[in-house]
Image (spheres, helix red, strand yellow):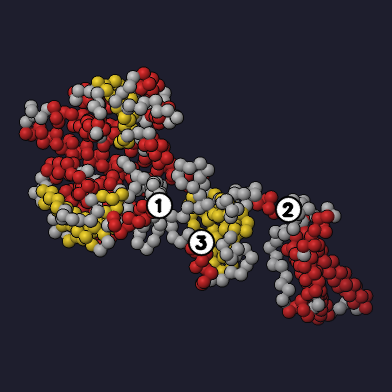
Amino acid sequence: MAIKTILIIEDDRFIGEMYVRSLKKAGYDVDWMVDGNDGLIAARNKPYDVMLLDVMLPERRGSEILQILRGGVEDLIPGTKVVVLTNFDQTEQARQAMEQHADGYLIKAEITPKKLLAVIEKLED
Amino acid sequence: MAIETRSESELLNRFWPRYRRLTLLRVVFSQLIIVALVVTVVLMLYPDPPLYAWVVIVLLGAISFVLTFMVVNMSMRPLRDLSNALVHVSGEPSAATPPNLNDSYFVRSRLRPLLKLVYDMATNQPNADAADADGQEPTVDLQAQLNHTSTGLVMMDAAGNITYANKSAPVSIDGQGKKSLELIFDVDPNIDEWRNERGEHDIHAEKAWRRIANKLTGEPDRRLFDVYVSYEKGSEAETIITLFDRTGEYQPEDDDLDFIAFAAHELRGPITVIRGYLDALNDELADVASGDQKELFQRLIVSANRLSGYVNNILNASRFDRRHLKVHLQEQTVADIYDTIADDMQMRAQAQQRLLSVDFPEGLPTVATDLNSMSEVLGNLIDNAIKYSNDGGSIEVTAGVNGDFVEIAVTDHGIGMPANVIANLFHKFYRSHRSRETVAGTGIGLYISKAIVESNGGKIGVRSVEGHGSTFTVSLPVYATVADKLTGGGINNQDFIERSSSGWIKNHGAFRG
């Protein structure tokens, strides 16, 4: 599957801009949402190939967004790969719950833009 | 027996001192009257008695005083003993020792049966019930009262079954109705182990544990106890456990640990930005930057990576201290572990002019380990080797099979350490005198490395010669030797490892990042 469109839900401006900048340079179509509500609406309105999801977000936490999109009977975003990106140390249960509905779970501090590109390339396989 | 709030005059223990005082006063008074009468009679018969007659009168008076005193005291003793016995069985506080039935005096004086009757009446249940029924002496409902205290009380029989537990005691009941203590012992021995040992060695024993939690940090209704246990062989309640709830006192320390985890996460935000932007700038300026500037970039990147590693160490140490460190053991090759940090380590070595050579032999067996945390351990060891060696020095990373383990060795030819330093090396915040002066660091890297390696079922060690360098070794179990344990515990591998002599520890679940 060729990845073209990416949705970033990230409230830290520096980090958000960093991802947007490097992903756009690499030729992806990128939408960036700052709060959890907007992020959820964006995800439901447009089928993205990849969603980069923060956990600690204003309005709605990332775990909640994922639960709404993937936790029900029907997968609301069947064509989307979800990568959770967080610096927040979640409890083991919360982390496992998110991992169950995600294609990746990464610590932001360990992921430079270059590594992020490598991760997205891997998702294509 | 009932203990009621009584007014001063109603207290049982007030009777005897008052009675004794009054009796002695009466005796003294009557003696004085007798002496006065004797003096009057003498003066009537001999109006002018000589001096010696007065001396004789005074002397006789004094002797009779002393004798009367002694006789009265002796005669009153049974009354004192009966009074003390009654005060004792009433449960009223008293400084006096209750009379001992085995005292020979009681046998001689035939008082023993009377005292025995007093004691028997106090302990005899039917009598006490009769008193209750008459409503004359209300007794305390012990069970109800014990459920009102915040102190936990647990009694166990000889088989270790809980025969009684009050409401405050941290006790859980399983499906079969079997009660068990809900306490997490992080020290050896725990209560059960200690009890079992007592059965073989002691008649009577006591032991105290401090700061024992009933639940893990973060779980609701977590309480912290000081636990006191007394053991009396052959007694109906052989083991009696008293648990003092000290949550208020100990909880703030736990909050400090939470604070560390919280602060570490705050640090990760800016680190993400610094590492990310450096990564981007380094790429984009590659064509225009001079050789010097490139080196400065490299140093920035290396430092940012180190900072990130330190934050991970602090987080892991905080998790470990709160017993939250989890590892997820999987089949890995040693090369896999190193590959995750290879670029970073080569860059660090290069930035500090060290030669890092890595050589893993072909055909090395796979190991059972947690990839993420083990790569952090290897990173810590290589980083230390870089820090504690000299410019231009070489660092070798090798591996080999040693019994059921694969041993990874990180060798430097730097400053080395004397034996007294090695003994403390793996302690938290330990930094040798010399390392404090010359090398930056947190003193937490080796502490958490040891914790991680041991959580992986491995061993960490060090050989060092002062002035010649050090070799740190990490031994990880060969996957084939533990594969059955890893796959036997279900999909999630939860709780598949039990504590045993080989150093496995409990509670291994998933661990990432």
Residue B458 at x, y = what percent? 30, 56
* Residue at figure coordinates x 14%, y 59% from the top left: B468
Disc 2 packing (10 Å; few <14; some 14–19; many ≥20): few
Q: Which residue is mark 3?
A: B192
Nearest the eye: B429 or B474? B474
- Whether residue B17 is visible to the viewer of this picture, yes or no, is no
Nearest the eye: B390 or A65? A65
**Foreground label between 1 and 3:** 1
Q: Which residue is mark 2?
A: B140
Q: Marks 3 and 2, Cα distance to the nearest angstrom? A: 32 Å
Residue B361 at x, y = what percent? 15, 55
Q: What kind of residue is marked 3?
A: Asp
Disc 1 packing (10 Å; few <14; some 14–19; many ≥20): few
* Residue at figure coordinates x 15%, y 37% from the top left: B299
Nearest the eye: B18 or B180? B180
The residue tagged with tag 2: helix, strand or loop? loop
| Contact flag, marks 1 and 2 (Cβ < 8 Å) | no
The residue tagged with tag 3: helix, strand or loop? helix
**Residue at the top extreme, as displayed:** A45
Q: Which residue is mark 1?
A: B489
Tell me, yes or no, whether dots 1 and 2 are on the same chain.
yes
Disc 3 packing (10 Å; few <14; some 14–19; many ≥20): few
